[in-house]
Image (tube, coloured by chain):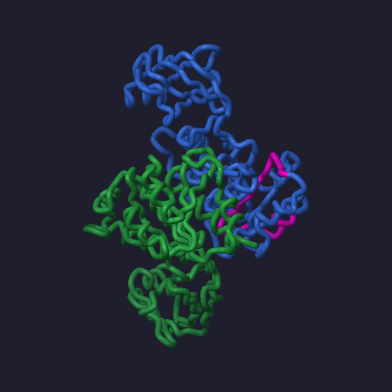
Chain colours: A blue, B green
Amino acid sequence: MKEIMSTEYFYAPPECVSERQIVITGEEARHIAKVLRHKKGDMLTVVDGQGGEYMCSIAAATEHTVTASIVNKLRKSHEPIARVTLAQAVPKGQRMDFAIEKGTELGLYAIIPLFTKNSVARPGEADRLLPPMPDEEGPGHKSARWQRIAAAAMKQSLRSVLPQIGQPEEFKDLMQRHKEFELILLADEGQQKISVASVFKGLAKMPRTVLCLAGPEGGFTQEERDLAQKHNARIVTLGPRRLRAETAGIVLSTLILAQLGELGE
Amino acid sequence: MKEIMSTEYFYAPPECVSERQIVITGEEARHIAKVLRHKKGDMLTVVDGQGGEYMCSIAAATEHTVTASIVNKLRKSHEPIARVTLAQAVPKGQRMDFAIEKGTELGLYAIIPLFTKNSVARPGEADRLLPPMPDEEGPGHKSARWQRIAAAAMKQSLRSVLPQIGQPEEFKDLMQRHKEFELILLADEGQQKISVASVFKGLAKMPRTVLCLAGPEGGFTQEERDLAQKHNARIVTLGPRRLRAETAGIVLSTLILAQLGELGE
């Protein structure tokens, strides 16, 4: 029997998990049985994307199906307590992939592909931003691609919660949902001074649900800033340098998670 | 005459800058004259990579040479005061490109490609990590590629200082130079608790020169951690999730620059 591979996590959604065993199929089964050549008796750590972590022993493994017996269960051992959602203006090319990967590693609860006045594409055009991969033809391939990137980053970073990658959403629609968040921060080049740290210094108590917004290359419009502020959003700077859209998203998420004590005490 | 294009910066190294004019050649001249079709009388902002920012008026433009008269000079208008150097363990594939681009946007002073015990490649092999681009044959192409990425990110982020992309360096050689830095921080998975913020809270005064180290996927070795601590390095956590090498580098740089007041007050 091999050692428990605590440094590699595998993913099986909750519908594959029963009381005593987990049935893994598809690409993940092929990876376990064919690529890594795991056999009966080998130990695996499987996460269900909803906080469940299972140490399992393989009962049977083919390249189509791996069946594993649950030996031990944990919940959310590497997960943040705070739920930080990043609304990320969708940048050009593959740069959104980066925001999804890094945001997942950092510990975001959800990532919303955001469309604003100055966005390079509209939600309906999202799929046109990238040429489809061979297995990603047809509408919605972009969203499937992002889900796959998030799942890979979840496993890589030892998380057990798969961040929700929301449907592309217009700025004004997202602002309608402002009551779902205790704190909303929007990073804007127009703001010269107020940092993330100074906003947190002024808070009476630590929020558990935070929405942060990173705009497109052209920035948010005055109308968008006004709408955000009407819904109690705090506008912050990330310093005097002009950050790319996806850099702003990750820097903002990093600073918020650090303030919430999720990156060390 | 067109408006000053304050949102696009161009790069000409100091040897191209004289008292009253700047002579831009090569790819940058082609970009200005041929791609953007700038003509005599158009205004440009040119940075020299060493802190000089020049507003200029084009005197003559061909696709080989653009000559511009200096109208106004600034120095380091978007530059951090602190000098933060990131020593980044070189990750696989194109992930180092990402660290260079994001690190430059953030405001790093220098980036050192770092080789440690658990690195996937040795310095001599650095060029083998990526297939050479058509214009990057031969030894050292990797370094030329990183320089080009840094120069593009400098312009994009409105910086005027081109971060030094050091020669690949072994961990123990870098530690020999520890006296060049007032503060050294090393991010390590073995450290469970002490955050970047808590280290800064304990400092008597703000450092002006900081070295931060982000290790490879396998982490630093005990021997490396001991050597770093012997040279007064502080070992910090970036939280309980396992970050990719380049993610750790950018998160660590972000948290340090924020503590130094370089990402807003």
Q: Position of residue B52 (x, y in %)?
A: 47, 77
Q: Is residue B219 above or below residue B76?
A: above
The residue lying at 51 percent from left, 21 percent from top is: A54
**Residue B213 versus residue B3: which sits nearer the camera?**
B213
| For residue B165, side relative to residue B188 (left or right) | left
Front position in the image: B236 or B32: B236
Q: Nearer the viewer, residue B96 or B184?
A: B184
Q: Please indicate whether residue A149 sits to the left or right of residue A214 in the image.
A: left
Residue B182, image x and y in percent?
Answer: 48, 63
B77 part of magenta stretch:
no
Q: Residue at x 21, y 58 (%)?
A: B138
Q: Nearer the viewer, residue B203 or A265?
A: B203
Q: Residue furthest front?
A: B230
Give residue A33's quadrant in the image: top left
Residue reaching furthest to the bottom: B20
Q: Does residue A172 appear to the left or right of B188 in the view shown?
A: right
Q: Position of residue A126 (x, y in %)?
A: 53, 44
User: In this view of the protein, can residue B143 be seen by the observer?
Assistant: yes
Instruction: Relative to A135, say whether B106 is above or below.
Output: below
The quadrant in which the N terminus of chain A is found is top left
**Total marks in image:** 0
Q: Residue at x 55, y 23 (%)?
A: A74
Give percent across and percent down for residue B150.
Answer: 41, 62
Q: Is residue A213 magenta?
A: yes
**Would residue A145 be visible to someone looking at this image?**
no
Q: Is residue B108 above or below residue A87?
A: below
Which span is picked out in magenta? A206-226
Give the residue at x 45% y 26%: A10
Q: Quadrant of the C terminus of chain A?
A: top right
Q: Where is residue A44, by image quadrant?
A: top left
